[in-house]
Amino acid sequence: MVDVIVAGAGPTGLMLAAELRLHGLHVVVVEREPQPTLQSRAQGLHVRSIEVMDQRGLLERFLPLGRKFTVGGFFAGLGTAWPERLDTAHSYVLHIPQEITERLLTEHALGLGAEIRRGCELVGLSQDEDGVNAELADGTRLRSRYLVGCDGGRSTVRKLLGVGFPGEPARVETLLGEMELTASTEVLTAAVAEVRKTQLRFGAVPKGDGLYRVVVPADGVAEDRAVPPTLDDFRQQLRAYAGTDFGAHSPRWLSRFGDATRLAERYRVDRVLLAGDAAHIHPPTGGQGLNLGVQDAFNLGWKLAAAVAGWAPEGLLDTYQSERQPVAAAVLDNTRAQTELMSTEPGALAVRRLLAELVNFEEVNRYLIEKITGIAVRYDFGEGHDLLGRRMRDVALKRGRLYGQMHGGRGLLLDQTGRLSVSGWADRVDHVVDVSEELDVPAVLLRPDGHVAWVGDDQQDLLDHLPRWFGADAG
């Protein structure tokens, strides 16, 4: 029997597979497409996702293949400055195409021993109290302890489960693709600048060798968004907005996206769970989709591993939904707000002008960027220290850095007192005795996803909190 079947080899599924392999689980990823996609719909990693990669020792693989940006405008194109004093050691956005992110995560998952089967479409599933039966399109049947649907907004897993996906349908649609343009740089720059005075869903970004990433509003909403647009569709809309199609030819890929927002009613049905776009869809404004999915996987991986290993405390797996569903709901809300702020209607333009003034205040700018980049998330762990429930930023220790101690995906007690112990949980929690000038508390207990589960210096209080996240004392 397989421990976990992951349906979907996008960023969410790949990240989850790797997290599960850190704990030694037998993981099989099934992916409908026979080859990795060349479409780079997502274009970067926000701060929290950068931290996630750093926590697992992956960031050095990403940095040489991306570009750091510290510019404004990530919230509905408002603001020109990157905020100061963000609570992170990685105060930037990393521009890196999705196809590269997927390649690096594939290498990471395979390197840890995950099995990835491409050209394998999941078409059926059933479950009982002991496991899940998965049926593939070629007639192959697999059985696993758990199954996670990371198979996108049109998720087969979600539909087979009968989980509701309420929300709003798309009202507007945008064409997105990569193609060659023959127009000069001067003509393109001037035309894009002029159109964007009134239409922010328009652009042509150079990718080198005459190739451009083109975005332009569509002519209405397609009946079937699974059918890609044609080059003629792009040419028609470019002429409608800019008066020229810029000599568009030789497309690499063409797609469309809408502003639909939907959130799964449940993230878990017994032994089957949902993550990433299978659990939530929203407009791509602010570039949050890929990041949200990767962070879902980071939250779920260690909990699912604990359930399979048998040490998960009661209710641990249910905290995946209770923690991540509100985060997704907040992202849906901020993308709804951004979409309204990008409208050309008079009322929306008036609100946009007002917010453009407010975002010049450092506190407002920082607040909005913290929402977009995922570092404002705080899970509800109850009353306690201000750090409780928040992810811990990387800090310098006397011997190295905090994130350098977290590559194995285990819990961690950072103990500046040297008097504490996690001996009964040593198989699940690392004990690091070290000091940091950047940390003004005696000790912190971190979950494998880096969120602070306890703060203090009292051994008995620590012993009272360890079972909540790490199960019973192993003795």
Image (tube, grey):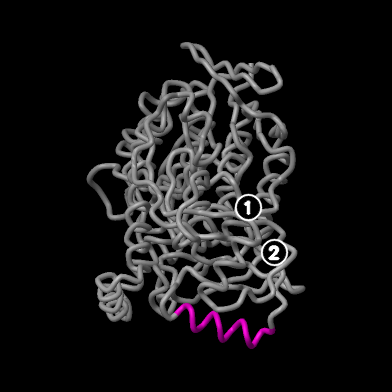
The residue that disc 1 covers is 57
Residue at image location 33% in from the left, 51% down from the top: 330
Q: Is residue 462 above or below residue 121?
A: below
x and y percent of residue 150 in the render? 54, 37
The residue that disc 2 covers is 65
**Is residue 51 something that shows in the picture?**
yes
Overall secondary structure of the magenta section? helix
Q: Is residue 272 above or below residue 65?
A: above
Q: Which amino acid is tagged 1? A: Gly
**Magenta part of the chain:** 184-196
Residue that lies at the very extreme toward the left in this rendered image = 383
Give the mark nearer the N terminus: 2 vs 1. 1
On screen, residue 355 versus residue 409, left or right, reads left
Q: Secondary structure at mark 1?
A: loop
x and y percent of residue 345 in the render? 30, 70
Q: Nearer the viewer, mark 2 or mark 1?
A: 2
Residue at image location 35% in from the left, 68% down from the top: 343
> In the picture, residue 358 is in which quadrant?
bottom left
Q: Nearer the viewer, residue 285 or 127?
A: 285
**Is residue 394 something that shows in the picture?**
no
Q: Nearer the viewer, residue 297 or 8?
A: 8
On screen, residue 81 versus residue 111, left or right, reads left
x and y percent of residue 317 in the render? 41, 29
Q: Which amino acid is tagged 2? A: Leu
